[in-house]
Structure formats: structure tokens, C-alpha cells
Image (cartoon, grey):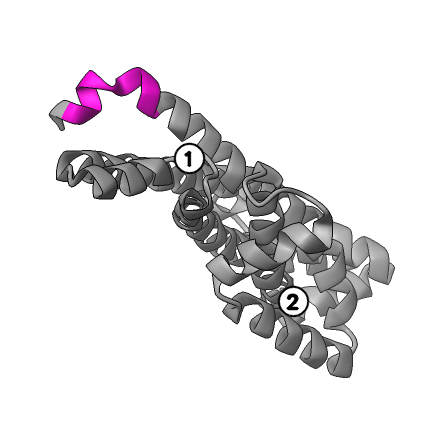
Amino acid sequence: MRYLIDNFAEIAGFARTHLYLALVPLLVGLVIAIPAGAAVRRVPWLRRITITVASLAFTIPSLALLVIIPPLAGIATIDPLNVVIALSIYSVALLIIAVPAALDSVPAEVLDASDAIGHTRLRRTLTVEFPLAIPVFVANLRVVAVTNISMVTVGALIGVGGLGKLFTQGYQRDYPDEIIAGIIVVLILALVVDRVLFALGRWATPWLRASGPSLTQRLRSAKGVGA
């Protein structure tokens, strides 16, 4: 703990780099996985292939991926973009599985009620399925975010910045306090990001906190169907 206090400015710089390397791939994953996951959900054979490919992609060892990407992308091994690309692959792999699973969690009676009041498939997906899938999706998103924060530390093995430097430097110097400081800050970052995503998920689903008729009952009532 003393090391953490004495070197706070340097560690804060590592933490900012660490967050950048963890959160940018998460955003890339969201942009790619949400539309792709929604598209493959309704095509069983394509969904099976997507899940298989995504699962295989996530099993590739992170260090091996960090060695493979530079020659393929035409970048230096120590380029931070190397870590961003690698974690983007992992993020997409996890989220493209999570999106269909989240949409599957929407109750069938809600979908029936939505169809009964005349929603088109696109409108139902955007205004009913996606909002109601948020709790399940956010739960998966939190796992991916924390996983990214953990995996960024591997980048230190190839010379990319972040809190992983505290691990490699601490090991090289045989200085456990530096390693412990790195572990503490990584855990703090993971907890903070997890809580922020949880709060965003709660904010995006106010109906889970409100009392009164369920969404299914309100949809049925709008069509004149008794709840």
C-alpha cells in the first residue's frame, strides 16, 4: 500500500492507459455484436455457426494472438493498437453470443402482445425486445468489461503500457509491493467499471423499479385484451 501512495501519479497514468485499452475494444464489440447478434438470431444454422466461430476465437491464447496480429495488421508488436484489436476480437466473440441469448429472454407473451397491437418486426425488435433484453445483456456486458480489464495486463509482456507494467517490473525487481499495488488497482478499476455498467443498466430499465401493471398487461390493455 505504501508503494501505491508514493507512486500515485505514475500508477494513475498506467490506470488511464489501462482503461483506454480495455474500454475501446468493449465499444468496438458493442458496435459489431449488437446488429450482428440480432441478425443471426433468427437464422438457426447461421446462429450455430456464429456461436462455434465465436467460441473458437475466444479460446485462442491472448499472448499468441498478440504475436499473430502485428504482421497481419501491419503494425508494430508494441503498438497499443495490437492490444485493442486482440481484445476487440474477444469482445465481439463474447457479445455476439450474448445478444441472441438476451433477446431470447424476452417472454413470448410480450412478443405476442406486441404483435397484437400491430408492431412491425423491426419496431418490435427496437422498442420491445431490445429494451426488455437489457438486464440479461448488461449482465453479460459486465463480464466482458471485467474480462477486458484483466486481460489488458497481458499486454505488458509485449511492452504495451497499462497496469501490467507493475507486474512485470515488480517481478524483474523482485519487489512484491509493486505487484500487489498493480493487483489492487486492477481490482478497483474492475469494480468501478462493473458498478457503472450496473447503474447504467438500472437507469435504462426504470420499469423494473416502478410499481404498477407489467408491460405485458399494458400492451394487452392497449389492444383491449383482458390481462
| Residue 151, visible in the rendered structure | yes
- Outermost residue on the bottom side: it is 45
Q: Above or below — where is 162 with respect to 116?
A: above
Q: Answer whether residue 9 is magenta in the image.
A: yes
186 relative to 224, above or below: above
**Would you name the residue on which mark 1 appears?**
162
Q: Are marks 1 and 2 in contact (CB under 8 Å)?
A: no
Q: Which residue is mark 2?
A: 100
**Closer to the camera, 1 or 128?**
1
| Residue range corresponding to the magenta coloring | 3-11
Q: Which amino acid lies under the numbered mark 1 shown in the image of this protein?
A: Gly
Which x, y percent locates residue 125?
A: 76, 57
User: For residue 92: magenta?
Assistant: no
* Local secondary structure at mark 2: helix
Residue 36, given in percent of the width and then of the height, sits at 75, 60
Disc 1 crowd, CA 10 A, few/some/many (<14, 14-19, 20+): many
Q: Is residue 110 above or below residue 33?
A: below
Packing grade of label 2 (10 A; few <14, some 14-19, many >=20) is many
Residue drawn at 67 percent across, 43 percent down: 75
Which of 145 and 35 lies nearest the eye of the viewer? 145
> Is the stretch drawn in magenta largely helix, strand or loop?
helix
Label 1 vs label 2: CA separation? 33 Å
Mark 1 vs mark 2: which is more N-terminal?
A: 2
